Structure formats: structure tokens, C-alpha cells
Image (cartoon, rainbow, N blue to C red):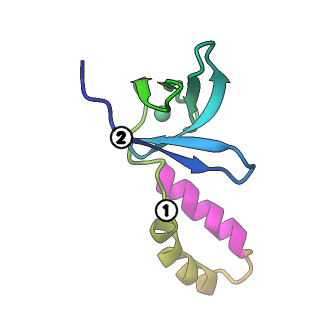
């Protein structure tokens, strides 16, 4: 059995918690009857799931249909291009530019 990657739990803006495993974020899916939890990859169209036990240890993680690095877009990846775009495209609201950059960074 392959070594499982380290995981971490990060709070969500909605007061829940997300699981981050190998740079990929999972959202809570459902509780297991034994106290563990099922998690679902947050990447669009990816069906990968992860399972943690009741001690929050990773039990299993599925295969992704995308590169594990891609969804982990940080502000540092996006922000440098935004200021330039904002200067060039003053008629486009900043949030739209941010979204555009974020989308480009992911896909
Ligand atoms: Zn995935």
C-alpha cells in the first residue's frame, strides 16, 4: 500500500472545515457510521473522495482526474497579474479580473 500523503484541516468561510490532502482541497461529504468522515474533492468534475477515521487520520484517498497541483491556487499566484490587468482594463470591475485570473490559473 502506498504511503498516504499528509493531510490538514482548514476552516471554511461557512464555519465548516475542509480537508487538504496533497495540495487538493476536499469538502466534507458525510459522516461514516464509525465516526470517520467522507470527503469529496472540490475540483469541478473530479469524483475523487477521501476517507478519514474518527481520529482524523487519512484512511484512503481516491485518484483525481486532474493534476494535484492545479486547484491549489494561492493569492500569490493570481495577484501579480491583476494590477496590470486593472490598469489595462479600467472598464472591467476588479472582481471580474480576479475571477478571470483564477479561472486561467486553474485550467
Ligand atoms: Zn480531484
Q: Residue furthest front?
A: 55
Numbered disc 2: secondary structure? loop
Residue drawn at point x = 61 percent, y = 87 percent: 87
The vertical placement of 10 against 66, above or below, is below
Q: Residue furthest left?
A: 2
Numbered disc 1: secondary structure? loop
| Residue 96 coordinates in the image, percent (x, y) | 70, 66
Read off the residue under disc 1.
Answer: 74
The residue segment tinted magenta is 94-107
The numbered disc on residue 6 is 2
Task: Indicate yes or no whether the magenta region holds residue 104.
Answer: yes
Report which quarter residue 18 is drawn in: top right
| Residue 59 coordinates in the image, percent (x, y) | 41, 23
Q: Residue furthest top?
A: 33
Task: Classify mark 2 as within 8 Å of ligand 1 or not, answering yes or no.
Answer: no
| Residue 47 coordinates in the image, percent (x, y) | 53, 24
**Neighbourhood count class around disc 1 (C-alpha, 10 Å): few under 14, some 14–19, many 20 upward:** few
The vertical placement of 32 against 69, above or below, is above
Q: Which tag is nearer the camera, tag 1 or tag 2? A: 2
Left or right? Give the position of 24 relative to 14: left
Amino acid at each position: 500500500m502506498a504511503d498516504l500523503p499528509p493531510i490538514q484541516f482548514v476552516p471554511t468561510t461557512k464555519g465548516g472545515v475542509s480537508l487538504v490532502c496533497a495540495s487538493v482541497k476536499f469538502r466534507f461529504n458525510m459522516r461514516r457510521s464509525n465516526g470517520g468522515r467522507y470527503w469529496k474533492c472540490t475540483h469541478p468534475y473530479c469524483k475523487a473522495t477521501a476517507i478519514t477515521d474518527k481520529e482524523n487520520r487519512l484512511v484512503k484517498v481516491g485518484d483525481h482526474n486532474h493534476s494535484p497541483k492545479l486547484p491549489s491556487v494561492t493569492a500569490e499566484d493570481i495577484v501579480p497579474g491583476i494590477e496590470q490587468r486593472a490598469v489595462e482594463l479600467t472598464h472591467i470591475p476588479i472582481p471580474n479580473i480576479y475571477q478571470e485570473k483564477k479561472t486561467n490559473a486553474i485550467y
